Amino acid sequence: MFPLQCVLRRQAYCLCIGLTGLISFQVTSSMTLAANIDPGQDTPPELTTLSLEELLKVEVTSVNKQSQPLFHAAAAVFVISQEDIRRSGVTTIPEALRMAPGIQVARLDTHRWAISSRGFNGEFANKLLVLIDGRTVYSPLFSGVFWDAQDTVLEDIDRIEVIRGPGASLWGANAVNGVINVITKKAKDTQGLLTVVGGGTEERAFTTLRYGASMGEHTHARLYGKFSERDDFLRSDGTPGGDDWRNGRGGFRIDHDLSSQDSLTVQGDYYRGSEGFGFTEPLLTIPYSQSIRDRWHYSGGNVLSRWKHAFSDSSSLLVQTYYDRTERNSRLFTERRDTFDIDLQHAFAWSQAHRLIWGLGYRFTNDHIINSTTISTTPANRALNLFNGFVQDEFTLIPNNLALTAGTKVEHNDFTGWVVQPSGRLRWTPTQALMFWGAISHAIRTPSRAEDDATLDQIALPPNALFPGSPVALTTFGGQRGFRNESLVAYEIGTRYQPVEAWSIDISAFYNRYDRLRSIEPGASSLATNPLPPHLVVPFVAKNKLAAETHGVEVSSEWHPIDWWRLRATYSYLRIQMITGTSLDPLGRNANGESPQHQASLRSLMQLPGDIELDLWGRFVDRLPALNIPAYVSLDTRLGWKPTKTLEVSIVGQNLLESRRPEFTSSFVAQNATEVQRGAYVKLTWRY
């Protein structure tokens, strides 16, 4: 390592660790939104201090499914604003999520991420619900997210609301450890022409073209198209990983005010991409495995419509429906899926003390999966139905001081039938600048398609490997009918405080108890003759024999020491204790070593003379002992300049402290992992 790199690494590490002490004195609510800005503002604002009055005006919708002040939300919620995204230099939604405390983001290669909230991370993490403009994007195939397909014009994102902790009483099953809702701007707020072009070492080339126009006083629309090409990363031995990534997409949004009480939104997207990847395929003959280099080809599209009617200032009705089509094709497996969803919700105040919201929903999804020599499902086609309803009441016990929110969601799914997921939240606001909250919640994760009827061939063992005279053995992992819901009971407390205009703080702590977690248990071996040669099948099947207890603390903060300089900081602590009981799962204790115990982040944003912006972002991520991933310190930089009101030039450096590093490895499918590389790119943004 060069001497300069050593110095930078040491300084960044000290900044991130020293931040932990700073947090307890002068830190801020990372609700930290650069939120003094108009959320729809398309022109980057100047740095200004976020006063308490302005902080109280910042609103979120994901906590209660209706707008409420962020400062008063009785949940561990963090908002990533458009200004945060612009000044971070990130080029994807997954990378933007690194700004939120309590969120574990690890990159496996150019196009795969392991993302989770409060632990249990993995490439197929299944306890985090992700939405884009209220459209659920998790896959019923494994109850997780294909992050490579989740994209939009980053400049059109209004905010990303990140809730750590259960949101199941409103959002339903699989909102176990958190909810991420990506909310885009209204068409009215993206008028005119936006052109973005850029490229660099890893981000080879990217371009965006978006145009917004009004069609009368009450109708606004926008169209967009974007394309990106990313270079492949390197393997640990320095050879090319073959995981290059190309992605293109386009879409539209139309917002129409039908009347003073009615509004209608129609929006849609279409995308197509391809990406290289490698995996190891087991063989029943010598050499008993082979390395395959292949490409994912994926595509999809969606259309969403949302109608909202306001009966009065305190009563509204919302109806939303969408259709989503996804396709993924490779040698590993091929999936085609169609999803239709409709939701209705009604919010009203039925007295001065009670604010009620209730809703009904239905989702239908149908898939077709083409088997491969490695992955098979039976049956190949399956249709799934989900019926749900929820009700929640916010009861004001003492006006402007104490409020209780209680509610539950009831669902019926085709795997396990009826489930009930209640929660209760208490908010106490002793002063305008101080708020305490606490919550008790129950959430469940329903089985995925893979856990119910899929089989994965993992490793082929040569003759005599198991015992003298044993034939070739094939280990498999499979789901089975009767897999039960995973269950969580969560206890949370938190506080938000802004003692002075320049400092604020947000702290949350939690204790979670999980039951019936998925375990991988050995089954009865059998001799098989199809395919030839005859071989011994050693199965491992999904069962519910694990439990766990987790606890942790999350802090987010902001300090504005002078007018032109802002510091934003986060820190997270997580501890997982697995309870194996009668489980024989050989990896049952690994969860604590697959998520970092400590994470810290420090961002410095400077507004310099001459319309120059200098932004630094240092991060510390603890080691992952179960995956043999060492701890690392990362430093990103961004230098921005606005020579005119319409043109912005940015130079971004990423992962500057080391040439490359591993962040995660795959556990189920033996896909080739590559290492995240140092990179730099130049970006031109023109608004007219």
Image: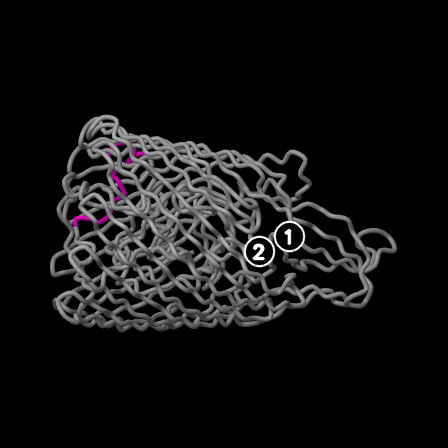
* Picture layout, residue 469 above or below residue 234: above
Q: Nearer the viewer, residue 169 or 54?
A: 169
Indicate the quadrant where residue 263 lies. Answer: bottom left
Residue 648 falls left or right of residue 330: left
Quadrant that contains the C terminus: bottom left
Q: Can residue 364 be seen in the rendering of this structure? A: yes
Q: Are marks 2 and 1 in contact (CB under 8 Å)?
A: yes
The residue sitting at 17% across, 41% down in the picture is 561
Report the residue at 38% width, 44% height from top.
170
Amino acid type, residue under disc 1 in the picture? Gly
Q: Give the spatial CA distance, label 2 vs label 1.
A: 8 Å
Q: Where is residue 363? Give x, y as percent.
A: 45, 56
Can you tell which mark lies on residue 479? Answer: 1
**13 or 368, nearer to the observer:** 368
**Highlighted magenta segment, given as a residue range:** 21-36
Dot label at residue 386:
none
Residue toward you, 460 or 57: 57
Question: Is residue 15 among what the camera can see?
Answer: no
In the image shown, does 312 or 439 lie closer to the viewer? 312
**Are there few (<14), some (14-19), or many (20+) residues within 10 Å of tag 1?**
many
Local secondary structure at mark 1: loop
> From the viewer's perspective, is 277 left or right of 456?
left
Residue lying at 41% horizontally and 56% vertically, measured from the top left: 136
Question: Which quadrant is home to the N terminus?
Answer: bottom left
Q: How is the image coloured?
A: one colour
In reply to whether residue 394 is colored magenta, the answer given is no
> In the image, residue 128 lies at what x, y percent?
45, 48
Residue type, label 2:
Arg
Can you give x and y, in whole percent of width and height, for residue 20 in the image?
A: 33, 36
Q: Which residue is mark 2?
A: 449
Q: Is residue 426 above or below residue 659?
A: above
